[in-house]
């Protein structure tokens, strides 16, 4: 049998009757696999050499049919082995091709998923940006609404409230602003007002006038206004229980934004409430001023006596309180000057003050002394008004003599200015407060007022300030009283009164009512009072707090001058 040479990478030749085998991994269906993916194992190049018996020369050997048949069978067996291996290789190639196809499909699916995820992420980022933009816009609108509401409600003057609106809205939210106010129940003639403003006034609903519908929430659409043919108009009623006016806004751009429109409608509602509150406050203030004015009696005129009075409104709180003054003659010809202070503020304190003043005038008809009058007022409060208290000071001036008799119930002690411009406090302990549930009898005190002397009766509101002791206020009043000259007191009583109050009240806000009575004993030749003339000035400043000076000031009442 001849030898066969092998090339590198080939398998050795097989002899007849034996199969040439090569180890390969099997895939499913007879092949081996490793892991999820099967590695591709390609067989090394091989060559199969078939050895056939060398036939002898025909003349030497006879044909061997049995050997030939055996050789042919062996060749068929090897051919079958080769074909089987080729089938295995084809099956393995098909398997790897299928596996590669599936892998490609997976890669394509993964790319599709990544693309879908990127698209979703892009949409989420866009939605987040939009949400942040909307949130910032809403925050900006709410901040403006809060600031504008605070600005509109910070004043109790409705004219001031309306005057601030253009400053708030122009130019960011409106090109220009028109405010139409009507306080009557009926809508006044519109004049040169847009039809949308008239419709808003009559219906109480917001109106939008533009060439195209605005589709604004809660707003009615109307045709373009002839008064504003180039810009949209938004007419908002200022309503509370009824329509108080109409706020007309011209759009800052081509149209109104729906969110901005909602904010403007809410702002108009709040401005309407603020205006209604300011209007009601002015009505209550005017009522209080009228009531307080009615309670300030006309001061009497007596031979040798000159009386003056002044009333100012409050700087804090309601314009009505319990401080009062009064001056009236008694049957014996003497004159009583009274200053009092009922605890509390408001109509209840004012009504109680009026009752005390009326009772005091009734008691004085019997000719009682100041102390006796205070004792009777104390009994009245104890038995009829047990939850109200009051302080008072009463001074009696008799024509023809310089002696002044006075008494006080829980009231600050009077101040005396002598002709040499020295001011001092009458160091006399006053009686208890009127109305305290204790029995009390008050005492009279007397003082000689030489010509040129001045007696100052005042309430605690004149000298009392927050974070200060009352002694400092009394000292300030004494210095102001000492600074007045005798000439000022005798010749220009009005100017002296103004100069006395200016350092006390001009630089402060008063939480309490203020009353001041200043009788001045001057040189004169009035025979009815023994060559001396008593000139009595009574100043009443009623004040407590709104936190700012009120818009109007009640007139000043001076001697022989009616209310203006």
Image (cartoon, helix red, strand yellow):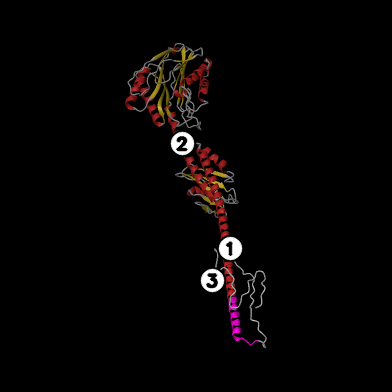
Tell me how far mark 1 sits from mark 3, CA to CA: 28 Å
Viewer-nearest of labels 2 and 1? 1
Residue 107, label in figure: 1
Relative image position of residue 379 (x, y in whole percent) = 33, 23
Q: Which residue is drawn at 55% across and 49% down?
A: 132
Relative image position of residue 478 (x, y in whole percent) = 49, 18
| Camera-nearest residue between 167 and 9 | 9
| Camera-nearest residue between 20 and 98 | 20
Tell me how far mark 3 sits from mark 2, CA to CA: 103 Å
Q: In this view, does 515 lie above or below 6?
A: above
Q: Dots 3 and 2: beta carbons under 8 Å?
A: no
Relative image position of residue 158 (x, y in whole percent) = 50, 38
Residue 30, label in figure: 3
Q: Is residue 521 visible?
A: no
Q: Which residue is drawn at 58% across and 63% down?
A: 107
Relative image position of residue 104 (x, y in whole percent) = 59, 65
Label 2 sits on a secondary structure element that is helix
Q: Mark 2 points at which residue?
A: 281
Viewer-nearest of labels 1 and 3? 3
Question: Circle 1: is it few (<14), some (14-19), or many (20+) Cα within 10 Å?
Answer: few
Q: In this view, does 394 lie above or below 234?
A: above
Q: Dots 1 and 3: beta carbons under 8 Å?
A: no
Label 3 sits on a secondary structure element that is loop
Question: Circle 3: is it few (<14), some (14-19), or many (20+) Cα within 10 Å?
Answer: few
Please report the bounds of the magenta region as a residue range: 61-83
Label 1 sits on a secondary structure element that is helix
Question: Circle 2: is it few (<14), some (14-19), or many (20+) Cα within 10 Å?
Answer: some
Q: Which of marks 1 and 3 is nearer the N terminus?
A: 3
Residue 57, label in figure: none
């Amino acid at each position: 049998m001849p030898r066969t040479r092998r090339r590198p990478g080939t398998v050795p030749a097989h002899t007849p009757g034996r199969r040439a085998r090569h180890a390969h991994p099997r895939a499913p269906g007879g092949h081996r696999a490793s892991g999820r993916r099967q590695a591709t194992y390609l067989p090394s190049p091989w060559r199969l050499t078939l050895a056939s018996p060398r036939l002898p020369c025909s003349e030497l050997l006879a044909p061997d049919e049995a050997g030939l048949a055996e050789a042919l069978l062996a060749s068929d067996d090897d051919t079958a082995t080769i074909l089987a291996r080729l089938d295995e290789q084809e099956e393995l190639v098909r398997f790897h091709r299928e596996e590669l196809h599936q892998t490609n499909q997976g890669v394509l699916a993964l790319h599709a998923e990544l693309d879908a995820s990127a698209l979703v992420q892009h949409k989420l980022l866009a939605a987040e940006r939009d949400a942040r933009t909307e949130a910032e816009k809403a925050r900006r609108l709410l901040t403006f609404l809060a600031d504008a509401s605070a600005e509109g409600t910070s004043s109790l003057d409705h004219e001031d409230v309306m005057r601030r609106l253009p400053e708030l809205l122009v130019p960011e939210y409106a090109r220009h602003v028109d405010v139409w106010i009507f306080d009557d129940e009926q809508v006044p003639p519109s004049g040169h007002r847009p039809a949308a403003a008239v419709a808003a006034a009559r219906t109480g609903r917001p109106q939008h006038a533009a060439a195209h519908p605005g589709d604004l929430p809660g707003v009615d659409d109307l045709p373009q206004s002839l008064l504003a043919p180039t810009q949209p108009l938004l007419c908002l009623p200022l309503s509370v229980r009824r329509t108080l006016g109409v706020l007309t806004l011209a759009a800052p751009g081509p149209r109104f934004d729906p969110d901005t429109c909602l904010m403007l409608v809410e702002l108009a509602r709040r401005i309407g409430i603020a205006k209604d509150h300011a209007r009601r406050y002015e009505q209550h203030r005017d009522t209080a001023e009228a009531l307080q004015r009615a309670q300030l009696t006309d001061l009497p005129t007596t031979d040798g006596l000159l009386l003056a009075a002044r009333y100012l409104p409050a700087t804090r709180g309601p314009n009505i309180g319990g401080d009062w003054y009064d001056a009236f003659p008694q049957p014996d010809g003497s004159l009583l000057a009274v200053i009092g202070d009922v605890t509390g503020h408001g109509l209840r304190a004012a009504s109680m003050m009026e009752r005390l003043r009326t009772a005091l005038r009734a008691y004085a008809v019997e000719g009682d002394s100041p102390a006796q009058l205070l004792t009777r007022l104390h009994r009245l409060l104890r038995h009829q008004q047990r939850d109200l208290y009051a302080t008072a000071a009463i001074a009696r001036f008799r024509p023809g003599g310089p002696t002044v008799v006075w008494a006080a119930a829980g009231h600050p002690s009077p101040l005396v200015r002598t002709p040499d411009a020295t001011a001092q406090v009458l160091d006399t302990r006053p009686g208890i407060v009127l109305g305290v549930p204790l029995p009390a009898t008050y005492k009279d005190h007397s003082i000689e007022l030489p010509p040129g002397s001045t007696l100052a009766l005042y309430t605690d509101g004149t000298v009392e300030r927050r974070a200060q002791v009352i002694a400092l206020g009394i000292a300030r009043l004494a210095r102001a009283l000492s600074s007045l000259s005798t000439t000022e007191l005798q010749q220009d009583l009005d100017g002296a009164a103004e100069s006395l109050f200016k350092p006390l009240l001009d630089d402060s806000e008063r939480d309490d009512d203020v009353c001041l009575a200043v009788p001045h004993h001057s040189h004169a030749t009035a025979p009815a009072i023994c060559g001396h003339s008593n000139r009595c000035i009574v100043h009443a400043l009623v004040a407590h707090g709104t936190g700012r000076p009120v818009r109007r000031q009640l007139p000043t009442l001076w001697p022989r001058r009616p209310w203006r």
